[in-house]
Image (cartoon, helix red, strand yellow):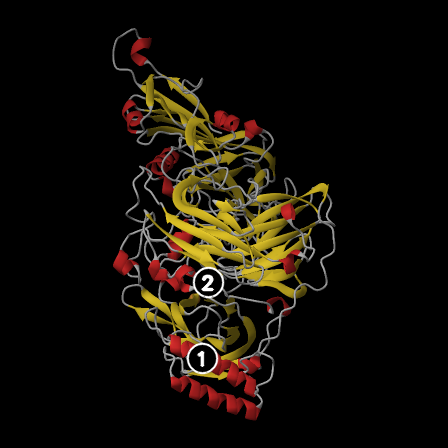
Amino acid sequence: MTMRVLLRWAVGVAFGVAGPVAWADQVTLTAARDTNLIQTLPADPQMANGGDDSIFVGRTNQGDGADRRRGLLAFDLSSIPAGSTITAVTFSMTLNRTRGGASQTRLHRALQNWGEGTAAGTSGGGGGGQAGSNDATWYCPYFPSSLWNTVGGDYVATASATTTVSGSLTTYTWTSAQLVADVQGWLNNPATNFGWFIIGDESSGQTAKRFNSRENASTGQRPRLVVTFTPPGAVGACCIPIGCTITSATQCAVQSGTYQGDGSVCTPNPCPDAVGACCQNNGTCQIVTQVGCAQLGGTYRGDGTLCTAGQCPIVLIKYVDPLPRPGVALPLSGLPGGAATYRITMTQFVQRLHRDLPLTTVWGYNGTFPGPTIEASSNQQVIVTWVNDLREPGGGLRTTHYLPVDTCLHGPDVTGQAPKTVVHLHGGHVPPASDGYPESSFGPGQEVTYVYQNNQQAAPLWYHDHALGLTRLNVYMGLAGFYFIRDSVENAIPLPAGEFELPMVIQDRKFTQTGQLEYPAQWQEDFFGDTILVNGKVWPYLNVKQGKYRLRLLNGSNSRVYTLSLSNGLTFTRIGTDGGLLSEPVVTPDVTIAPGERCDVIVNFQPLAAGTEVFLTNSAPAPFPGPPGVGVVPEVMKFIVQAQPGYTAAIPATLRPVPPPDLLRVSQQRDFHIRSEADVCTGSKWLINGLMWDDVTETVRLNSVEIWSFINRSPMMHPMHMHLVQFQILDRQDFVLQGDQVVTTGPRVPPPAWEAGWKDTVQSYPLQITRVIAKFTEHTGLFPYHCHLLEHEDNEMMRQFRANCESDWDSNGRVEPADIAAYINQWQADVNNGTRITDTSGNGTVEPLDVSFFVNRWFSALLAGNC
Ligand code: C2O
Ligand code: CU
Ligand code: CU
């Protein structure tokens, strides 16, 4: 610290005569930095002595070529007001050891800047220590990367001041007009303030003089500079937010300070305590003192800082909110889990997504994000009236979306900013009228009633918005929820239930400065948030008992894939896929889950001591796949093990049989090439077979089995989803592109055991053919199939297939006599070659009975004009 002394020569007053009052100031400065240049031979390691408590000058030995020592010193002049006139300068140093007799010791103005590191020899030794980075050495002003122009340092050849240092250990001073000129020059142009070289007698050997450095324990004997100056005009104390400064009244006003009057001083401090911005984690900002900020538990941004925009970003501390459990939807009639009728309303509201976030505007079903869980059972009909009641905060029905809508996309190109919605039951076996057809979206004030027969086995489904060209925005706003179908087979299998069964929807979001959902106005090929939410809470925690939990994982994100792992060596026991249970549990160290997919897993906290914290983490790059670490948000949530027993029964070794795919019934194979294409409006878009939503080219026949091949020619994984069916993954096969040709390079690899169950969404990897096999049943009409990266889906990576009558053998949309003839031909061929496509009775053999079975059914269909 600089000692500051104010000297007053109130000349006029002293003589009792009224007149102008002249002020002079004097500061006593200690060196801001000092070091020692140590001569070394070029071949030897370079040495430095910045950290030592002494400065050597002169020569230590008798001409060994490495005996020169030069001091370097600089002072911080910032306490002298700019514009001052320097009137006197006295430099002083204390000699603490000497060799030889009296010698001249000179100050030369340095011409280059230099560094003081911490390298030092043993205390008081002149040899120094090996130079570290940025140390000044004989060769380098900053070791090791820059060099002096002249070995031994760059300085003005003419000394600024010279003093004869005799043998007596005392304090010596240097003073001269040139020292005044040096200091004035540095004050006027602080960028040239490189200080002085101190150079002793180098004309003969063993002339070394050793002075106390600024590191010396005798604080009173450190090098010092006394500068006397005349400030520009009258000065006084000026209170500014960072404290007290001596300046002129004008200068004080410029700095928005409070001038304390000419001649007022800063010691004692006349100013109120310095204040600055104090930030709370929730982003609020107050101007208080540093002490006050600490009392508030805030983060002090420094004296004089202001509460400007962006000064206090919201800091989302992880694992401070408990994991919410989505509520179960309550029906108007019937009971949850049985046949029931619901009315579920989409509204806009605010919800607390993290302790330190302000309330965030979201959209949700029945006032919650995520929506309430619909509990259903196989073959028990659920009727839902879905109501779009999205309103402005003022109460009126919304006419525009909450988020900016990109009207380049199909859908909004017609409907503009309208906040249309339509609900799809993902994984459901649902007729088109209740499937949430993307073009059947409806606006605020409107509603539709959908009927779900639940004609399928127990499975973790979910419902979410599916409006054409708006899906990514509507789901991002919060329109998604679980829909569990249960049945007696699954209920009979002992698995963790009740409090030990946890629905967990994982989503990524991005927040504005004010804690609102942020999403780009222009369509982008993917969206990745920097914050992970589980069940609508940012990075939550959950207290768990010492036992097994069934986590019903859903990736409800727009684009982000997760590779989930658990700390403490815990693994996932996978028991189910999108469409229900696996035939047996599979243990894996991690789970990679793509948007739209579900994964049913058991996690066992039983072996862990009470208090153990288990972290659920993510390592999937974004985009996926990609270089490790790129785009990853590693934290998901935390479990804290409690000292309470939980569900400890064993997981059965077998679960629910999954029948092998019915390859013999395959009547059609289709190839779907995935690649992107330029788009004049959005820049690019992803297409399936180069075609778009309106191009309906695929017609399937009910009760037929088909193999669909997703041929991914792109560098990213696309989770491909089909409506109407649950399919099975047949295999994956690597390929290369030769020109435009797909050339397979490896075997067809069946899916790993944990993927060998019922699926409705499949990870289709780059440069692989992913084949799935599905049987189309029951419902005719148009159904979407698409990539479940919502950004892709919204920009044409969604097409539709038509399901036709079984009796429409040629799939031309009509049932005609020619269909029967074609069927009989195929039947005869099947009999001849032993395939089973025409095994209409489904008994495993093709026999005359199949023809009569079919002829009966089809003729009546033909006559009735329907299936
Ligand atoms: Cu989950 Cu057609 O979507
Ligand atoms: Cu779906
Ligand atoms: Cu895609």
Of helix, strand and loop, which one carries label 1?
helix
Q: Looking at the picture, how far across and down is residue 671, in whole percent? A: 44, 79
Q: Which mark is residue 708?
A: none
As rendered, which of 746 and 802 lies closer to the eye?
A: 802
The residue located at (31%, 37%) in the rendering is 394
Q: Which residue is mark 2?
A: 430
Q: Looking at the picture, how far across and down is residue 60, in whole percent? A: 60, 46
Say if residue 258 shows up in the picture.
yes
Q: Quadrant of ligand 3?
A: bottom left
Q: Quadrant of residue 780?
A: bottom left
Farthest residue to the top: give it.
Answer: 16
Say if residue 331 shows up in the picture.
no
Q: Which residue is mark 1?
A: 858
- Is 664 rendered above or below residue 127? below
As rendered, which of 277 and 821 lies closer to the eye?
A: 821
Q: Amino acid under label 1?
A: Trp
Q: Amino acid under label 2?
A: Val
